[in-house]
Each structure stands twice: as C-alpha cells, then as structure tokens.
Amino acid sequence: MPARENDVLSEAERLADVLKDAKEKMSPPEFLLLLIEVNLRVEEITKIDYASVCVPSCGCSYK
C-alpha cells in the first residue's frame, strides 16, 4: 500500500476514535449534527460523498 494510502487510513482511524469518544459524551441530536458536519468536510476534502457510503439501510447507523 502506498504511503499516501497508509496516511489516509491512519487519519480515518483517528477520526473514528474521535467520533466514538464524541458519541459517548454528546446527546444523539448533537452527535448527529457533528456527524453531518464531518461528512460534509470529508466530502469537501476527498470529493467523495462520504455520507452515501454509510447509510442506515445498509445496517450502518449513528445510534
């Protein structure tokens, strides 16, 4: 795997940890807003519609 891919995966793992901590400390509505903001920022940076990758209909949920 190229170094750039390793960097991206490392950052994705770090983001997952931050979101996990935030989920434990925030109310569901607050966390949902944070998740929306994160999805928009990821999309802005990567040009990938990140929110469409993980949707409730596929069994992935913010709950």
Image (cartoon, rainbow, N blue to C red):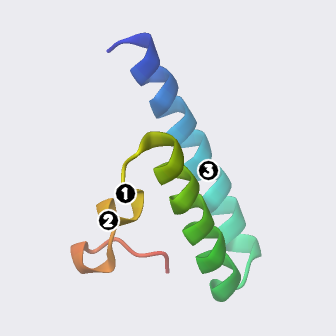
Give the number of the mark in front: 2 or 3. 2
Q: Mark 2 or mark 3, which has the lower sequence index? A: 3
Q: CA distance from mark 2 to mark 3?
A: 20 Å
Amino acid tagged 3 = Asp
Residue positioned 45% across, 41% down in the render: 46
Secondary structure under tag 3 reads helix
Q: Mark 3 packing: few (<14 Cα in 10 Å), some, or many (20+)?
A: few
Q: Which residue is identified by label 3?
A: 17
Residue closer to the observer: 47 or 27: 47
- Res 23 → quadrant: bottom right
Q: Could you tell me residue 26's position as x and y percent?
A: 74, 77
Task: Tell me, yes or no, whether the two marked residues, 1 and 2, touch with CB atoms within 8 Å.
Answer: yes
Give the number of the mark in front: 3 or 1. 1
Compared to residue 11, the image places residue 38 above or below, namely below
Compared to residue 37, the image places residue 27 above or below, namely below
Residue positioned 32% across, 79% down in the render: 56
- Res 34 → quadrant: bottom right
Amino acid tagged 2 = Ser
Q: Which residue is identified by label 2?
A: 52
Amino acid tagged 1 = Asp
Task: Tell me, yes or no, whether the two marked residues, 3 and 1, touch with CB atoms within 8 Å.
Answer: no
Q: CA distance from mark 3 to mark 1?
A: 21 Å
Q: Which residue is identified by label 1?
A: 49
